[in-house]
Image: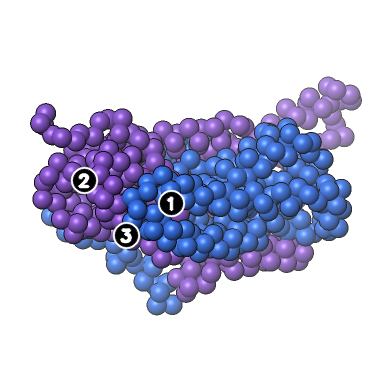
Chain colours: A blue, B purple
Amino acid sequence: MQFNFIQIILILVVAFLAGTEGILDEWQFHQPLVACTLIGLVTGNLTLGVILGGSLQMIAMGWANVGAAVAPDAALASVASAIILIEGGQGKAGVGTAVGLAIPLAVAGLFLTMIVRTISTAIVHIMDAEAKKGNWRMINLWQWIAVCLQGLRIAIPAGLLLAIPASTVQGWLKLMPTWLSEGMSIGGGMVVAVGYAMVINMMASKETWPFFAIGFALAAIQELTLIALGAIGISLALMYLALESKGGNGESASNSSNTGDPLGDIIDDY
Amino acid sequence: MADKKFQLTKRDRFNVMWHSQFLQGSWNYERMQNGGYAYSMIPALRKLYPDKKDLAAALQRHLVFFNTHPYLASPVLGVTLALEEDKANGADVEDEAVQGVKVGMMGPLAGVGDPVFWFTIRPILGALGASMALSGNVVGPILFFVLWNLIRLGFLWYTQEFGYKAGSAITKDVSGGLLQKVTRGASMMGMFVLGALIERWVNIKFIPIVSKTPIQKGGYIEWDKLPAGAKGIQDALLQWDMGKGKQLTNIKTTTLQDNLDQLIPGLAGLLLTFLCMWLLKKKVSPIWIIIGIFVVGVLFHLWGIL
């Protein structure tokens, strides 16, 4: 579909919000679940946006900025792939392709944020100079400029994408053979494993592996909802900690880091 | 308390909390969250140091290197608020003491924030929302957004207040038992949920047919013996009973996937996850793994395996 003027403005607003959140990580406007839903909402394709958001969220699960490392950029991936999905007009059938396209977009977004983070280095030097003068208003201003740059990082590519006529986008998507789009949907179903693997590598230890095993086994019971599973998980963790402090040999307290990770060791030695 | 010259009100502290949401706004490769930290402190510093020279010193004091989890900066901000307040009231607080508190707290706190927020709460809420969203249910995204921000704002405010009230005494507890316990508990909970998510959401379906066995008479629907018209359709559906009753054809096809499901449901997804973990530990970039999986998906589909 072709967007009208108001829709384009609203899409750019959503893109801007997603861009700022991509760095701030507070309100989560950059998470696919939120960003794709909002793009769907402002373009009148709410359900489609929600479905794409859900699919991408599963993939983006383990993407997090840890320390100085920057994760693949969920903001550009969600915004751009949602625009392509809706412009393409293929409906639900296009979700698989949109998910596939999201991955290179996430990498592109990653480079853009690295550029802005480098520019911010210059900005904090300006802040230094203003601080010497005790000029707090200018520090506020430059902080806002830095935030806006991060917003533009997504809003500008989104604007460029919107400048391409919908018919052209549809033409490109039609060029894609079915085996490719079906294959990409299948890949999208598997690719979530990467996010989970990243998270597990962060949290795995000798004392957490049994929890993983119980979770995996219980999930096969389809009657258990995610909320029920969450309740079981919390209860198990609380019981473990409570029993530990009662039993009190204090030995396991030192195992919280990755040192006692048997599977990890096997993987390392492999 | 009453004779203090400068006193930060609840409103001032709330302003600091609100500003701290932009902590990472000027994140840079040189001093990371320094600009955001100074920006967060400004509502308080303005009030504490009416003299421009003192204010300049205070601003510069907070433009030094700082980096932690964006939410766990709140307790640090709380403590520094308490310290700056004392300093403004004439107490002998050295610049080094302020730095020491900030540097001493940011490391251990980042170690708590990443597993708790990024790797436990967000995946859980995200998966909860996404599982509803996949069927087009808009409640999914709303639930995620509302719950996350309630937890986040509550956390920012209460930990900052906690830090402010405890003052520098809090630094003793940072390395102590409670935080470690929270982190460990979150990791256990997180791993439990991850196990469940991998079983449910890593989709791999092997389509090759392993066997075709004929079914004995009575095990399948005998289409030619059904009554004609709508009555026949009703009869067939009753016999089929949503897959629990009779088979649709007189040959039972078993795919590779059926065999795997009998053994361990979700085994293929689990093995794929372990493979990814191994590749990640071998320092393969996640982006390459993702691209590789897409290539494999397309190729295996072409060959009729997936």
The quarter in which the C terminus of chain A is drawn is bottom left
Chain under numbered label 1: B
Q: Which residue is mark 3?
A: B64
Q: Secondary structure at mark 3?
A: loop
- Discs 1, 3 touching: Cβ within 8 Å: no
Residue at the spot x=47%, y=58% of the render?
A: A123
Residue A44 position (above or below residue A127): above
**Residue type pointed to by label 2:** Glu
Residue at the spot x=48%, y=32% of the render?
A: B146
- Discs 2, 1 touching: Cβ within 8 Å: no
Residue at the spot x=63%, y=45% of the render?
A: A15
Residue A174: give x, y in percent of width and height: 85, 53
| Residue A233 as seen in the image, left or right of residue A241 | right
Residue B269: give x, y in percent of width and height: 55, 57
Chain under numbered label 2: B
Which of the two labelled residues, at mark 2 and mark 3, occupies the earlier sequence position? 3
**Residue type pointed to by label 3:** Val
Q: CA distance from mark 2 to mark 1?
A: 22 Å
B218 or B148: which is nearer to us? Answer: B148
Which of the two labelled residues, at mark 2 and mark 1, occupies the earlier sequence position? 1
Residue A99 position (above or below residue B128): below
Q: CA distance from mark 1 to mark 3?
A: 14 Å
Q: CA distance from mark 2 to mark 3?
A: 16 Å
